[in-house]
Image: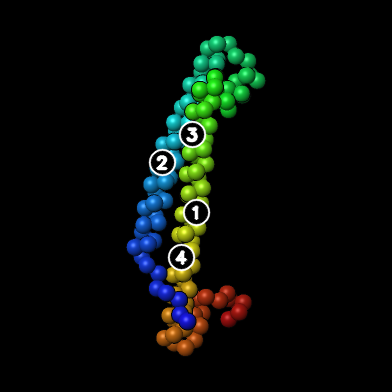
Amino acid sequence: MYPERPNVEEFINLVDKLADVQDELNKIDYEYSKKVANNVRSAINRGAKTRELDCVKVLGNNEEEQKVLDGLQQQIFDRKKATRMLWGKIEAWKAQKELYRTDSYHQVTGKPDKSFFSDEEN
C-alpha cells in the first residue's frame, strides 16, 4: 500500500490556524501582563513590601482580580496547548509529505531514495 498524497490545502489551513492561535495568545498574554503590572503598581502605591508584591503578581490585589488573572492564565494555557497540537499536526503533515516523496521515487525508479538514508549507510 502506498502512502496518500498530502493535501496542500490542509497544510495551509493548519498554518493559518496556528497563526490565529498565536495572535490570540499574544493578545491575551499582553492583557495578562498589563493587569499584573497594574496590580503591582497599585500595590506599590499602597506601600506594599517586596514579599507582598510577589503575591500580588500571582494573585492580584483582591478576589475579583484573582479570578480575572486565573481566567487569563487558563486562556494562555489553552492557546499554548492548541499551538503544540497544531505544530504536531504540521510535523505529521511534513512527515507524510516526505514519506510520499521517498515512496514515489522508489515506485518510479525501483530504488530507494538515496537522500532518505544517511551517508553512513550509502
Where is residue 41? Give x, y as percent: 51, 18
53 or 1, nearer to the observer: 1
Residue found at x 45% / y 64%: 93
**From the viewer's perspective, is residue 9 above or below residue 80?**
below
In the figure, residue 46 lies in which quadrant?
top right
- Of discs 4 and 3, which sits in the foreground? 3
From where the camera sits, is residue 33 visible?
A: no
Q: Amino acid at mark 3?
A: Leu
- Of discs 4 and 1, which sits in the foreground? 1
90 or 59, nearer to the observer: 59
Disc 1: CA contacts within 10 A as few (<14), some (14-19) or many (>=20): few
Are discs 3 and 1 less than 8 Å apart at CB?
no
Where is residue 34? Give x, y as percent: 46, 27
Residue bearing mark 3: 72
Residue found at x 51% / y 51%: 84
Q: Earlier in the sequence, mark 4 or mark 1?
A: 1
Q: Earlier in the sequence, mark 2 or mark 1?
A: 2
Q: State the SS at label 4.
A: helix
Residue bearing mark 2: 24
Where is residue 33? Give x, y as percent: 49, 30
Residue found at x 44% / y 70%: 97
Q: State the SS at label 3.
A: helix
**From the viewer's perspective, is residue 46 above or below residue 118?**
above
**From the viewer's perspective, is residue 78 above or below residue 89?**
above
Residue bearing mark 4: 94
Q: State the SS at label 1.
A: helix
Q: Earlier in the sequence, mark 4 or mark 3?
A: 3
| CA gap, disc 3 and disc 2 | 11 Å
| CA gap, disc 4 and disc 3 | 33 Å
Q: Earlier in the sequence, mark 3 or mark 1?
A: 3
Q: Earlier in the sequence, mark 2 or mark 4?
A: 2
